[in-house]
Image (tube, rainbow, N blue to C red):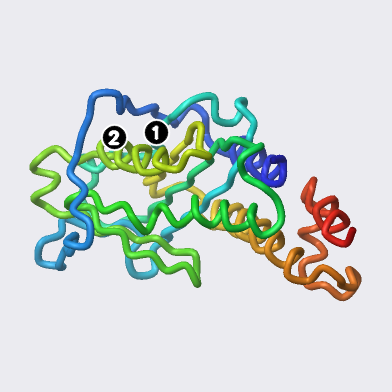
């Protein structure tokens, strides 16, 4: 499962290491309210990634313990109680999986998508995510009442980790929240697009077993990512 490893390494190497905070989620809990998590403008304290502000979301999988040694919730920028107004936002998930359980072909692609779709099933009370998969945005509304009750990224992160671990193929997750207004969200967005391009190429390979590589719109991704060409040739066999 090295398909994403080069892209993961590039992203992690560009993060400002001295600005990363590791949040302790070992003894926190927060309610997941499911479909009832509606936050109106009158009830929100602020919006992360709203309007024209950056709202980046990305997910990649790996089997490498160097990238994800254990569950981690990391934060670059102010925590939820420290934020006072609307601002940019990003959430990146690097998920360590059991390589032998992920399968190949369409099974592999569906297993990756199943991990990605976890984000649609997490609804921390007072933290409403509005996901737009078509343009890679994931803005969040945060309720005033939730901040009064002590909501922070540790509580949000704990719920994410718990939901990810409902999938038996997942060993550990590195969850990165970014709220630093000065962060380069445009560059981060390019990394997120690369993750999605890799996932899409896996699907493309197995839906088009016989193809002319020279005319394929995904040729550049396939050539740059270790393992994708091998998948392609294996599918032809």
Residue 38, horizontal then vertical, whole percent = 17, 64
16 over 222 or under it: above or below: above
Task: Locate the C terminus and report the quarter of the image it occupies.
Answer: bottom right
Question: Contact, CB < 8 Å: mark 2 with mark 1?
Answer: yes
Front one among 110 and 145? 110
Circle 2: is it few (<14), some (14-19), or many (20+) Cα within 10 Å?
many
16 over 92 or under it: above or below: above
Residue 90, horizontal then vertical, whole percent = 43, 51
Circle 2 — which element?
helix
The residue located at (42%, 69%) in the rendering is: 132
The residue located at (60%, 26%) in the rendering is: 65
The residue located at (66%, 61%) in the rendering is: 197
Q: Which residue is mark 1?
A: 73
The residue located at (55%, 30%) in the rendering is: 68
149 left or right of 229 in image: left
Q: Which residue is mark 2?
A: 154
Picture quadrant of residue 190: bottom right
Q: Which mark is residue 45?
A: none
Residue 59, horizontal then vertical, whole percent = 53, 50
Residue 176, horizontal then vertical, whole percent = 44, 40
Q: CA distance from mark 2 to mark 1?
A: 7 Å
């Amino acid at each position: 499962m090295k398909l994403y490893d080069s892209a993961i390494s590039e992203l992690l190497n560009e993060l400002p290491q001295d600005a990363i905070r590791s949040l302790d989620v070992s003894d926190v809990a927060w309610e997941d309210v499911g479909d009832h998590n509606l936050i109106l403008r009158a009830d929100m304290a602020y919006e992360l990634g709203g309007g024209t502000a950056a709202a980046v979301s990305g997910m990649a999988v790996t089997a490498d313990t160097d990238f994800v040694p254990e569950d981690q919730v990391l934060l670059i920028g102010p925590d939820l109680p420290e934020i006072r107004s609307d601002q940019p936002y990003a959430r990146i998930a690097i998920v360590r999986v059991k390589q032998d359980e992920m399968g190949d072909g369409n099974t592999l692609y569906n297993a990756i998508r199943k991990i990605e779709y976890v984000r649609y099933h997490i609804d921390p009370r007072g933290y409403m995510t509005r996901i737009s998969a078509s343009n890679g945005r994931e803005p969040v509304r945060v309720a005033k009442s939730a901040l009064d009750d002590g909501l922070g990224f540790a509580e949000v992160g704990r719920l994410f980790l718990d939901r990810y671990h409902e999938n038996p193929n997942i060993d550990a997750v590195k969850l990165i929240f970014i709220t630093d207004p000065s962060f380069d969200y445009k560059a981060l967005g390019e990394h997120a697009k690369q993750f999605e391009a890799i996932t899409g190429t896996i699907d493309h390979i197995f839906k088009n077993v016989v193809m002319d590589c020279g005319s394929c719109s995904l040729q550049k991704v396939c050539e740059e990512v270790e393992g994708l060409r091998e998948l392609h040739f294996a599918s032809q066999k």
